[in-house]
Structures are given as structure tokens and as C-alpha cells.
């Protein structure tokens, strides 16, 4: 048993100063069979600690219905076996470019405040979650050395009572290791997110000395730490792929360490937002109140360990710097996971239309005067079909969807009439009555950062025909997790026009291993391989393929389901399994 404490200038392990060299690795973004490999890579880079968030919405999809909360405990056990300490950031809000910042869609009350309706649900969740952490603290022989209170709260709110209540709850549930907060290095963020008596840390990507000077103005004593050193960044659908120069990132890492600070690389290994859990951001500069910017499925983050678990140039540069602070020689990196031995091609052999998928796996249909939101239909990740009748006879008028979030494919009397978005809510061609209108609305990911976190999805402002509201709206939702097991779905022959719907095929694999799934000509949708949700694909880019972890594939036949929401290749639709691109940053085993 050991004791980890916060001293006047340093972190202390059994009374002696230690520097934390940590790396972020989210257990929920890496296939469990690959945890050991990724953790060994952290050790080989020169790190002595791993940090992870905990996504509440992943583990409690419905109130009181918890799902594999023990995964956190298993990950912490794996960290201990790898010889790493662990920092746990349980939220309840985590950001992390994750759906809704980790907050469940079903929450009530004013989120991230001392509102009793919200805090009561947090308390109930923490009582379920925290035993996985408490029993693995360092003073009980485990790896956990610190636990975070909330996350970057100073970027969001100023409810000091809320932060104190969370800290008191962590202590009451048995957390004995030091608590901490993390915020941007600006005065309003540090003052809004800090708690008296709790260690404050800062998050940044550059200008380390300036950031630590800001921290010292608010916290004159105690160790300094960059809890998130942004050594890369994330991508949005329809935008450019973001890359940070390895030399530039290495220079900032060296600056942090020369300041005598501890550091947590965000991310050391990003992984993948499988199963549609990627979040979204709002543009609009500092206000984060502008257009929706949905995050891609890959969370590669241009990290030192890439999405496929391979060391990049940044890994080797960081290792050179971190080796100077190690107690002895660093271990060599473990061998890269075996890639798929033989590329394979898949041609779907069966199909069923979206309406049939909704009939088979959708929730109950509702009818109401106004369109219900996704939350009212209990849809977290998924889509909703709204149906409304334009009465008649009447002349053609514009059809307008007010408060649309996020994307709607519209059909009028069974014919596709267009695609609407938040920024383009008016159908191009007017609609005459009598007409039947269907709107298939997809959530592109809930906002994970800023003042619009927690906003509703779907049609939030009503349907207008000219200036008249259309009432009597029928709605039915389809959650993506309802398609995790769809082996008994009735299928038809492939459509000649590449119509939207659920496509099925099988692919024979020889030499199963890590692979990518290429989708030439497909537009937008989701993929499952042997029941494992790979996540969203979208021809908008910049992501062009989906990562398939080796443990998901099996020798011989593999079942692939693909839900195409706009249009498949009309002739000869095909998918390809291939080894990860070996031309990508993948230097030899040593520099």
C-alpha cells in the first residue's frame, strides 16, 4: 500500500517527490482485447500514468439500467498490470468529443448546476460507479492516484455550490486520493472552475510558461500540471483533416517539463468513437453557438499512437524527451497488432427498406399536435421518421421545418423531395395539398462542449406550410443500439436504384487481423461487423474508411450489415476489407 498526496511544490508518493508523466487513453474507445497492447505502448513512450474519462451515457442508457460499469474496473486493473498509475475523470460531464459530453439524453433539471433534480441523478450514478474506483485506489493497492471533479467547468458555468457538492459526494463515497479540477488557463475559467482546497490544473496546447503563470495567480502553492496537453486535434465531417507538426508538439512538451510541471498527453492514443458515439461541436468562435460541426468516427487525434495502435513520428520524438525524465531505460514498444493478411471484397446480397427496418426495430409510434423531440421518443443515437399530412385542396406553399436538428431527408407522397439541415430549413419546391410528407431526421451527434450542451434533437420548433403550423404529427424513432443484433431481419433482393435501407452481406476472411473497411460510392450511414458497431461513415469526408479491430473479425465467414441513409451505389455495390494503410506515419521499431 502507498500514499499519494499533494505537497507544497510536488506530488508526493510516500513522502518523496514524483512527476506525473501521463497519457490519455479512453477504455471505451479501444477494443478491450487491445487494452494491454495500448497500455504497453504508453510505458514504452516513457509515461508512468494513464488517464481516462468515464462516459455516463454509455453505461446508463436508461434511468437505473446500467450496462457494464465494471469495464472501468477492468481497465484500471489492466493499467496496474502494465505498471501504470491511473487518473480517473468521472464527470458527470466529460466533453471528450463524445455524445452530449457523456451526459445521458434522459436527464432532467438544469444540467451542470446544483439543481436538485440533476444532482439527485448524479448522486445515484456516482454511488453505482465509484466502487470501481474506490477499491482500486493506491492506498488499497490499486493504481488510482487522483480523481477529477467535473471537467472544465469554468468554460461553462459559475455554480460554486455545484462543484463543492460534487467534491463532497466523491469524498463521501470513499475517494481518499487527491481531488483536482482542470480548466483553460484563463482567469475566468480558473476562477469559475476551481474549488478552494482542491488542486487546480490547466489545459492547453502551447505557451506553457504563460499558462502556468496564470495558474500560479490562482494557486500560489502546490504542484503545477497540464492535465490536457493537446498534442493533436480532432476532425469534423466535411472539414479538413487536422494535423499538428511533431516537432512543434515536441517543443511544447519539452517546455512543459522544463517548467518542472507534470503533464497528461491528450491524447496519447485516441482510438475510435465506435457505435455512433461521436459528439459534435458548435462553430461561431469563442461563443460556440454557431453551426453544428459533427465529429468524425475516428478519434485518431493525430496522437503519438495512431488509431490502429502504431507508433508515429510524434511517438518517437516524445519518447526521446520523456526518456530524459525516466528512472531507467525505457522498455521497447510491443509488436504492432497483426494486420489483416489478405484483403477481401464484400458484395451485399440482401436488402430491406428503411420503413421495414423501422417497423422491425423501431420504438412505438406516437401522434401529437407538435413534433416530439428525440428525447421524448427515447432516442439517443439514431433517427426519427416524422409524418404529417398537408391538408387540401390548397395551392403549393413552402414547407419549412423550424428548429431542425440535425439533418432531414424529405419525401412527398413517397418521392424524395430534398435534404434539409439546420441552416437550410425550407424545401426548395413548394408543396401542394393534399400531400403526405415524411421527414427522416438523423442526429449527427449531440453537442459535447459549450453553452448548447444538452440541447434537444429532432424537430424542435414545428412544421410550417407557408405560415400555418401543421399539426397531427406522427413520429417513430429508431435507436442504433436496436440494430446490434439483427440476424433475423427479413431481406429482399437488392434494389436496382441503390435505395436507402439496410444491406447485408458476408465476407470470408483469411488471416484475421486489424483492418479498414472501405466504402466506395456509399453516401452516409452506419456499419456493423459481427454485431459490433463500427460507427458512422459519410462521403463528406475527411474520413474515408472505418477501422475494424482485429478481435472483431474471425477466420472464415463474417456478417456485415450496412444501414445506408441516402443512397448506395446503384450498380454493383461493394465494400472492401484491407489492412490499415502502411504508408501512414509508421516508422520502424526504433528511430
Image (tube, rainbow, N blue to C red):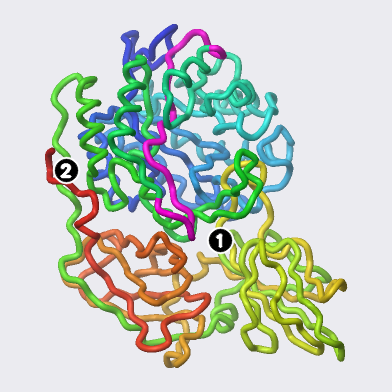
SS for callout 2 = loop
Instruction: Give the percent coordinates (x, y) of residue 72.
Output: 41, 42
**Residue 66 showing in the rendered view:** no
50 sits left or right of 328 in the view: right
The residue tagged 2 is: 334
Q: Residue at x 65, y 40 (%)?
A: 287
The residue tagged 1 is: 444
User: Which numbered disc covers residue 60?
Assistant: none
Q: Which quarter of the picture shows residue 21?
A: top left
Q: Nearer the viewer, mark 2 or mark 1?
A: 1
Instruction: Give the percent coordinates (x, y) of residue 193.
Output: 60, 26
Between 63 and 330, the residue placed more toward the observer is 330
Q: Which quarter of the picture shows residue 162?
A: top right
178 inside magenta stretch: no
Main secondary structure along the magenta-highlighted residues? loop
Magenta range: 217-241
Between 124 and 103, the residue placed more toward the observer is 103
Q: Residue at x 59, y 50 (%)?
A: 447
Instruction: Give the percent coordinates (x, y) of residue 313.
Output: 23, 41
Mark 1: give few (<14), some (14-19) or many (20+) Cα within 10 Å: many
Q: Residue at x 77, y 87 (%)?
A: 435
Q: Where's the N terminus, which quadrant?
A: top left
Amino acid at each position: 500500500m502507498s500514499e499519494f498526496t499533494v505537497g507544497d511544490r510536488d506530488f508526493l508518493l510516500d513522502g518523496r517527490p514524483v512527476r506525473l508523466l501521463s497519457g490519455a487513453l479512453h477504455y471505451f474507445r479501444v477494443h478491450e482485447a487491445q487494452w494491454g497492447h495500448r497500455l504497453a505502448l504508453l510505458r514504452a513512450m516513457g509515461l508512468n500514468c494513464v488517464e481516462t474519462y468515464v462516459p455516463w451515457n454509455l453505461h446508463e442508457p436508461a434511468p437505473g439500467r446500467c450496462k457494464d460499469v465494471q469495464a472501468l474496473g477492468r481497465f484500471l486493473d489492466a493499467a496496474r498490470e502494465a505498471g501504470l498509475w491511473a487518473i480517473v475523470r468521472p464527470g458527470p460531464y466529460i466533453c471528450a468529443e463524445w455524445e452530449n459530453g457523456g451526459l445521458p439524453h434522459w436527464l432532467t433539471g438544469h444540467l451542470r448546476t446544483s439543481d436538485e433534480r440533476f444532482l439527485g441523478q448524479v448522486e445515484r450514478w456516482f454511488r453505482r460507479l465509484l466502487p470501481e474506483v474506490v477499491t482500486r485506489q493506491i492506498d488499497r493497492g490499486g493504481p488510482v492516484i487522483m480523481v477529477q471533479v467535473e471537467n472544465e467547468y469554468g468554460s461553462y458555468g459559475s455554480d460554486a455550490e455545484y462543484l463543492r457538492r460534487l467534491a463532497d459526494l466523491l469524498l463521501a463515497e470513499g475517494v481518499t486520493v487527491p481531488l483536482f479540477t482542470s480548466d483553460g488557463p484563463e482567469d475566468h475559467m480558473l476562477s469559475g472552475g476551481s474549488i478552494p482546497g482542491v488542486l487546480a490544473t490547466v489545459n492547453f496546447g502551447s505557451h506553457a510558461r504563460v499558462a502556468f503563470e496564470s495558474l500560479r495567480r490562482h494557486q500560489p502553492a502546490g504542484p503545477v500540471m497540464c492535465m490536457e496537453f493537446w498534442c493533436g486535434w480532432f476532425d469534423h465531417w466535411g472539414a479538413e483533416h487536422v494535423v499538428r507538426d511533431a516537432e512543434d508538439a515536441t517543443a511544447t512538451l519539452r517546455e512543459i517539463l522544463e517548467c518542472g510541471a507534470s503533464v497528461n498527453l491528450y491524447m496519447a492514443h485516441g482510438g475510435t468513437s465506435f457505435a455512433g458515439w461521436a459528439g459534435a461541436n458548435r462553430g461561431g468562435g469563442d461563443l460556440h453557438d454557431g453551426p453544428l460541426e459533427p465529429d468524425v468516427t475516428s478519434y485518431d487525434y493525430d496522437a503519438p499512437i495512431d488509431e490502429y495502435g502504431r507508433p508515429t513520428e510524434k511517438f518517437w520524438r516524445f519518447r526521446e524527451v520523456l526518456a530524459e525524465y525516466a528512472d531507467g531505460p525505457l522498455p521497447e514498444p510491443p509488436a504492432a497488432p497483426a494486420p489483416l493478411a489478405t484483403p477481401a471484397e464484400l458484395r451485399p446480397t440482401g436488402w430491406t427498406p428503411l420503413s421495414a427496418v423501422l417497423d422491425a426495430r423501431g420504438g412505438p409510434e406516437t401522434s401529437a399536435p407538435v413534433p416530439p423531440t428525440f428525447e421524448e421518443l427515447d432516442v439517443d443515437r439514431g433517427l426519427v421518421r416524422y409524418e404529417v399530412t398537408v391538408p387540401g385542396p390548397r395551392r403549393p406553399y413552402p414547407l419549412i421545418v423550424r428548429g431542425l436538428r440535425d439533418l432531414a431527408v424529405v419525401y412527398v407522397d413517397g418521392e424524395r423531395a430534398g435534404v434539409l439541415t439546420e441552416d437550410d430549413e425550407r424545401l426548395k419546391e413548394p408543396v401542394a395539398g393534399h400531400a403526405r410528407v415524411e421527414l427522416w431526421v438523423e442526429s449527427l451527434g449531440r453537442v459535447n462542449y459549450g453553452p448548447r450542451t444538452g440541447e434537444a434533437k429532432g424537430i424542435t420548433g414545428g412544421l410550417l406550410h407557408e405560415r400555418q403550423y401543421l399539426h397531427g404529427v406522427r413520429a417513430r424513432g429508431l435507436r442504433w443500439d436496436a440494430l446490434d443484433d439483427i440476424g433475423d431481419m427479413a431481406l429482399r433482393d437488392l434494389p436496382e436504384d441503390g435505395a436507402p435501407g439496410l444491406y447485408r452481406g458476408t465476407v470470408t476472411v483469411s488471416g484475421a487481423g486489424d483492418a479498414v473497411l472501405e466504402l466506395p460510392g456509399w453516401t452516409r450511414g452506419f456499419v456493423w461487423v459481427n454485431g459490433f458497431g463500427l460507427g458512422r461513415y459519410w462521403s463528406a469526408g475527411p474520413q474515408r474508411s472505418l477501422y475494424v479491430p482485429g478481435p472483431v473479425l474471425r477466420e472464415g465467414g463474417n456478417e456485415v450489415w450496412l444501414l445506408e441513409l441516402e443512397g448506395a451505389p446503384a450498380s454493383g455495390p461493394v465494400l472492401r476489407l484491407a489492412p490499415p494503410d502502411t504508408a501512414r506515419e509508421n516508422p520502424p521499431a526504433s528511430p
